[in-house]
Amino acid sequence: MTGSIRGVVTVVGRILLGAIFLMAAVGHDIPNFNQTTEMLEKAGVPYPAVLLAGAIVFLIVGSLSVILGYKANYGATLLLVFLVLATYYFHAFWKETGQAQQQQMINFTKNVALMGAMLFIMSNGSGPMSLDCRVKRMPGS
């Protein structure tokens, strides 16, 4: 893949990946804060309102970092922490049976794949068309 095509594909990939998390925070968690807090409480999450506020910050900061390619390894780390906790509390397929177990297994494996994407960003960076790359090319950096 040529450099310019690789750069464009990487940007599109970062946008698609980050959009999942940004939309979750802005489209669901913030407007439904009270209902989501109740759901967290029922799932046994300690300090649900505090941790939901923290999760929203992780989702917004992490997704924008990945999308923009600015300190994307840190943004991916925030999203990885979110994914590990959300997967444990909400996709515990081992606690379910039948159709519910199957559905939670699907959600669990999707989140594991997203964890892999975060690890990939953490180890490989945000690509050639990123703010990180632009900052590195600036004189005096």
Image (tube, helix red, strand yellow):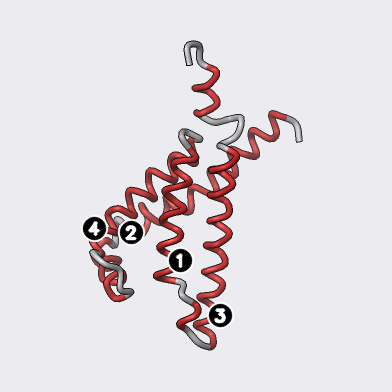
SS of the residue under disc 1: helix
Give the distance between the C-alpha atoms of the residues marked 2 and 1, in whole angstroms: 16 Å
Residue placed most toward the observer, 7 or 96: 96
SS of the residue under disc 3: helix
Q: Name the residue beneath numbered marker 1.
A: 87
Residue 41 in which image quadrant: bottom left
Left or right: residue 42 versus residue 64 is: left
Give the distance between the C-alpha atoms of the residues marked 1 and 4, in whole angstroms: 18 Å
Badge 3 or badge 4: first in the primary sequence: 4
Q: Nearer the viewer, mark 3 or mark 2?
A: 3
Q: Name the residue beneath numbered marker 3.
A: 102
Extreme-front residue of the structure: 123
Badge 4 or badge 2: first in the primary sequence: 2
Q: Are marks 2 and 1 in contact (CB under 8 Å)?
A: no
Badge 3 or badge 2: first in the primary sequence: 2
The quadrant of the picture occupied by the N terminus is top right
Q: Name the residue beneath numbered marker 2.
A: 29
**Can you give x and y, in whole percent of width and height, for residue 68 in the image?**
48, 35
**Circle 3 Cα neighbour tier, 10 Å, few/some/many (<14 / 14–19 / ≥20):** some
Badge 1 or badge 4: first in the primary sequence: 4
Q: Name the residue beneath numbered marker 4.
A: 50
Q: Amino acid at mark 2?
A: Asp
Q: Amino acid at mark 3?
A: Gln
